[in-house]
Image: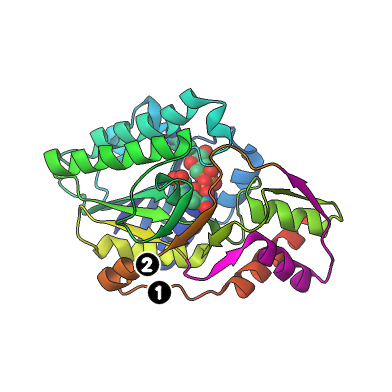
Amino acid sequence: MMCVVTGAAGFIGSHLCERLLADGHAVTGIDCFTAYYPRPVKERNLAGLLGRPTFSFREIDLSAGVPADVVAGAEWVFHLAAMPGLTRSWLDFDTYNRHNLTATHRLLEALKGSPTLKRLIYASTSSVYGKYASGDETLPTRPSSPYGITKLASEQLCRVYGDEFGVPVVVLRYFSVYGPRQRPEMGYHLFIHAILTGRAITLTGDGLQVRGNTYVADCVEATIRATQAMPGETFNLGGGELVTVLEVLRKLERITGKSVTIERHAPRPGDQLATGADVTKLSRHIGWKPTTGIDEGLARQVEWQRSLLG
Ligand SMILES: NC(=O)c1ccc[n+]([C@@H]2O[C@H](COP(=O)([O-])OP(=O)(O)OC[C@H]3O[C@@H](n4cnc5c(N)ncnc54)[C@H](O)[C@@H]3O)[C@@H](O)[C@H]2O)c1
C-alpha cells in the first residue's frame, strides 16, 4: 500500500512508519517538528527511517494546507499529527486549535474526492471522555480539557467529511500509550528518568488514578489492522490491564532495583482520574488483542531510557 503517516517524527508515528515499512508498504512521513518537545528528540525518532528506499519525509505544517502531491496516490492515511497532552492546552488554546482541528481540516480537504484513498485512520484519545474514561465507546464524551475538545471536534469533522464526501474514516481513541520513545513530558517517562537519575518523583494527586496503558507495539498493530474496519466506526484502543499510578511506581522499583522518593503535588485541572479501555468492539471487528503486559512493557521502556542516559 501507499501510506501517508502524519506526525511521523513523533512517538507513535515513528513506530508506525517502521512497522509499515517492515510489512512491505511505501510510506510518506509528514511532520513539522512542533515545539511541544525538542526537535532533536523527534529527529532521533526518525533516524531509523531516513534513507530507507521506500520511505520519504516531508517537513510540512498541515495547518498551513496540504500540497496535493503529498497525498496523491495515497491508499492508507494515518493522521497522528497533533499537539498532545492536556496540561499545556490550558495555556495555549490557539496552538492546539491550529495543530489539531485546523490541521485535520486541511488534511480532509486534501483527501476529499481522492480516487485512491481506502482508509483514513484518525488517532483520537481517551481524553474525549474526560475525567472518567473507563468503559466502551458508549461512554458519553465529556472532555475536561481544551486538548480533549480539539480532538473531539476533529473526530466530528472527520465524521462530517465521511457522511458528506465519502472520506472513509475510522477513528481510534488511544488510551495512555507507553514504551520506547515515549514523549519526554509523559508520566512514565518522567518517573523512569527520575528513578534512573536518583531524583524525587513529582506525583500529582493521590496516586490512586487508574490507568489502562497501551504498549506502543500493540497500539501500532491495532492501528494498522483498523484499515480493515468499516468506515464510520469509532473504537477504543487500550491495553486492557488496569493499574494505579502507585502500582506502576512499585513495578518500576522492582524493574530498576532502585527505591522511589515521591513529592506530592495537587491535581492539575482536567486531570483524568480513571482511564481503562473496554476494547471488546475493536477485538470483534479486527480480531486484535493487546499482547504486551505492563511489566514487560515498562521493562522495555526502562531499558530504552537507560540507553539514552548512556
Ligand atoms: N501518546 C499517547 O499516550 C496518546 C494517547 C491518546 C492519543 N494520542 C494521540 O496520538 C497521536 C500521536 O501522539 P504522540 O504521543 O506520538 O505525540 P507526538 O507529539 O510524539 O507526535 C505528534 C507529532 O505530530 C507533529 N505535528 C503536530 N502538529 C503538526 C502539524 N500541524 N503538521 C505536521 N506535523 C505536526 C509533531 O511535531 C509531532 O512530531 C496524537 O494525535 C495524540 O493526540 C496519543
Q: Which mark is residue 78?
A: none
Residue 230 location, quadrant:
bottom left
At 60% from the left edge and 69% from the top edge, which residue is drawn? Answer: 297
Residue 50 shows up from this direction:
no
Q: Does label 1 point to a residue whose CB lies under 8 Å from ligand 1?
A: no
Magenta-colored stretch includes residue 174: no
* Image vertical order of residue 91 relative to residue 203, above or below: above
Image coords of residue 54 (percent x, y): 41, 56
Image coords of residue 302 (percent x, y): 71, 64
* Image vertical order of residue 181 relative to residue 164, above or below: below
At 32% from the left edge and 72% from the top edge, which residue is drawn? Answer: 283
Quadrant where the image shows the C terminus? bottom right
Horizontal side of 161 relative to 310 (left or right) equals: left
Give the residues drawn in magenta, as a range.
Answer: 239-265
Cα gap from disc 2 to disc 1, whole angstroms: 8 Å
Image coords of residue 224 (percent x, y): 36, 62
